[in-house]
């Protein structure tokens, strides 16, 4: 349906909640690429890499709607309202989100708002950073000798959410590998909770930032040492944290840095 046809009929266009993957443009799905090349409007997040943004239809309206700690371009309600507004006069609207829309990406909230407004929605999954980033660092999240369970958890919770906090003690006891998104700023608290639940201070931990890109950096330590290492090195977010014995396999795969496809 063309934009003109939408205006005449009063119908909505379609919003695609698209996962951009973790950064490496080679990890973008083919479906996502086709949608970017044919979009009328693209509302993109802060962590979407420049090579992926370069794939967007040059005639499309591009809107930065990303969030970074302390620097929110648009509030969540504003983003949802914007998508509804753009769907009134455009056929193909892409909401481009880092990683996967439904893994700590607030895609569920946006989907609810759009459907309540009568807007058609399609989800295009992306490779989440919690899987891809450790892989690029040579860390398998599961391994028959070290880990048969993995938990993905956010380290940055919304105030006033459905429950007071993540049950770190339960996670510490139940999972052999823990992957923490957005946890660098709260790491001292998280580590304290894990140690209180019985995790050994010698448990390995890896912090990986700018994962799957040529800028990827890792900081390897233990629960007892990592906060001190962060202070000494100036290591900063955004980063993924991997906690568990599988971190000891880091470095076995000496395949070098990801290929730069820019």
Image (cartoon, helix red, strand yellow):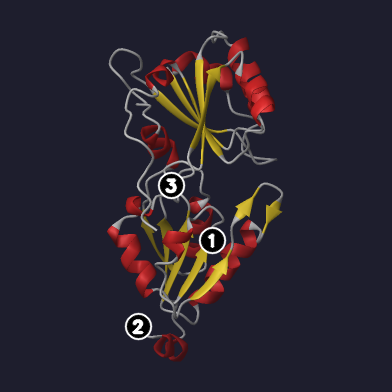
> Quick check: 224 left or right of 171?
right
Looking at the rendered structure, which numbered label has been put on residue 113? 1
Q: Are marks 2 and 3 in contact (CB under 8 Å)?
A: no
Q: Quadrant of the N terminus?
A: bottom left
Q: Residues within 10 Å of mark 1 (few under 14, many from 20)?
A: some
**Residue at the image point whose x is 41% and y is 58% from the top:** 18
* Marks 1, 2: nearer the viewer: 2
Q: Secondary structure at mark 1?
A: helix
Q: Quadrant of the C terminus?
A: bottom left
**Residue at the image point whose x is 52% and y is 58% from the top:** 110
On the image, the x and y values in percent for residue 13 come to 42, 76
* Marks 2, 3: nearer the viewer: 3
Q: Secondary structure at mark 2?
A: loop
- Residue 91, compared with residue 122, is above or below; it is below
- Residue 35, compared with residue 72, is above or below; it is below
Q: First in sequence: mark 2 or mark 3?
A: 2
On the image, the x and y values in percent for residue 54 come to 43, 67
On the image, the x and y values in percent for residue 169 come to 57, 17
Q: Could you give the CA–CA distance between mark 1 and mark 2, rounded to whole angstroms?
A: 22 Å
On the image, the x and y values in percent for residue 43 come to 52, 66
Looking at the rendered structure, which numbered label has been put on residue 22? 3
């Amino acid at each position: 349906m063309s934009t003109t046809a939408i205006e005449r009929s009063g119908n909505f266009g379609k919003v695609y909640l698209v996962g951009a993957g973790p950064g490496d443009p080679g990890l973008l799905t083919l479906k996502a690429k086709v949608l970017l090349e044919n979009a009328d409007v693209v509302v993109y997040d802060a962590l979407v890499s420049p090579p992926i943004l370069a794939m967007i239809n040059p005639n499309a309206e591009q809107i930065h709607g990303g969030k970074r700690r302390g620097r929110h371009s648009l509030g969540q309600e504003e983003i949802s309202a914007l998508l509804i507004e753009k769907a009134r006069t455009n056929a193909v609207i892409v909401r481009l989100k880092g990683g996967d829309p439904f893994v700590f990406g607030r895609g569920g909230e946006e989907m609810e708002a759009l459907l309540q407004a009568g807007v058609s929605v399609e989800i295009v999954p992306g490779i989440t950073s919690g899987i891809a980033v450790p892989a690029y660092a040579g860390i398998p999240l599961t391994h028959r000798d070290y880990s048969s369970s993995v938990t993905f958890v956010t380290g940055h919770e919304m105030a006033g959410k459905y429950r007071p906090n993540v049950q770190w003690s339960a996670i510490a006891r139940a999972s052999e590998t823990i992957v923490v998104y957005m946890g660098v700023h709260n790491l001292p608290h998280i580590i304290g909770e894990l140690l209180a639940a019985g995790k050994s201070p010698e448990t390995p931990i890896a912090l990986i930032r700018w994962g799957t890109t040529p800028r990827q950096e890792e900081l390897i330590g233990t629960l007892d040492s990592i906060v001190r290492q962060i202070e000494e090195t100036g290591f900063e977010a955004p980063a993924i944290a991997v906690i568990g014995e599988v971190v000891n396999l880091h470095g076995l795969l000496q395949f070098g840095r990801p290929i730069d496809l820019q």
